Amino acid sequence: MIGRLRGEIVFKQPPWLLLDVGGVGYEIEAPMSTFYELPAVGETVILITHLAVREDAQILYGFIREQERALFRSLLKVSGVGARMALAILSGMDAARFRACVEQEDSTALTRIPGIGKKTAQRLIIEMRDRLDAVGGVAGLVPGPAASQVGAEDRAFADAVSALVALGYRPPDASRMAKAVDDGAKTSEEIIRAALRSVSAS
């Protein structure tokens, strides 16, 4: 199992990044909570990883902190929740907010995340209630500031829309969400974070 990687960021476009570790390139999928804190392309980062082995693929997921991976793994144990939905949850709200939703049984907030319906939200609340303490320290998982700067405004917007689509939003909705928060000066990560926050607050 691959549990930790330290290397140079070669490419990043949410939700994917390429990490060069000793000349070997690792393709990694990560939630936005990790992307918010990644350094710029060309810089070194340490990621805690989870390797998912399937019949048709081996997918490596990366997280900036151990607590993120622990929450991700706990979410995978919930009936009907796969890796894609677990990433969407970690991208749609920070872990402190997720914990609050579970403790307050706020299924409405959870259904704002793409792919989560009422029944899934109720399962998350029921099945995660007794697992949050085991995750440990999730209240401290708050997205940090974006670290990279994108040169072209249209590239930042396009990358943000692409990432939102990858997170489960329909292309028209993703474009509308990005346009609503893009002031022409934001990086793609900042546009994504603002768009997701606007959905969470609505």
Image: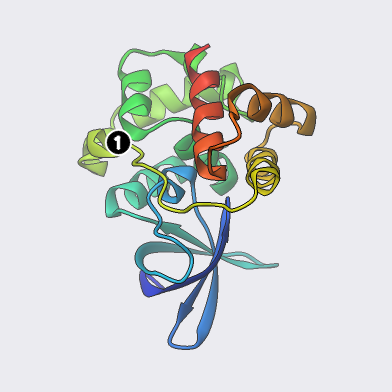
Residue wearing tag 1: 131
Question: Which residue lies at the image location 43% right of the left edge and 87% below the top edge?
Answer: 22
Q: In the figure, is residue 12 to the left or right of 9?
A: right
Find numbered disc 1 in the image and state the secondary structure of the residue it sits on.
Answer: loop
Question: Which residue lies at the image location 40% right of the left edge and 63% below the top edge?
Answer: 49
Q: In the figure, is residue 169 to the left or right of 46?
A: right
Q: Nearer the viewer, residue 160 or 76?
A: 160
Density class for disc 1 (Cα within 10 Å; few <14, some 14-19, many ≥20) is: some
Q: In the figure, is residue 157 to the left or right of 81?
A: right
Question: Which residue lies at the image location 34% right of the left edge and 47% below the top edge?
Answer: 68
Residue 127 in the image: above or below residue 144: above
- Disc 1 residue type? Arg
Regarding residue 79, the answer to whether it shows in the image is no
**Could you say where residue 9 lies in the image, as x and y percent from the top left?**
47, 69
Q: Which of 5 and 19 is in front in this view?
A: 19
Residue 44 in the image: above or below residue 158: below
Quadrant of the snapshot with the N terminus: bottom left
**Could you say where residue 36 lies in the image, as x and y percent from the top left?**
42, 46
Question: Which residue lies at the image location 34% right of the left edge and 41% below the top edge?
Answer: 144
The number of callouts visible is: 1
Residue lying farthest right?
Answer: 172
Q: Which of 105 and 88 is in front in this view?
A: 88
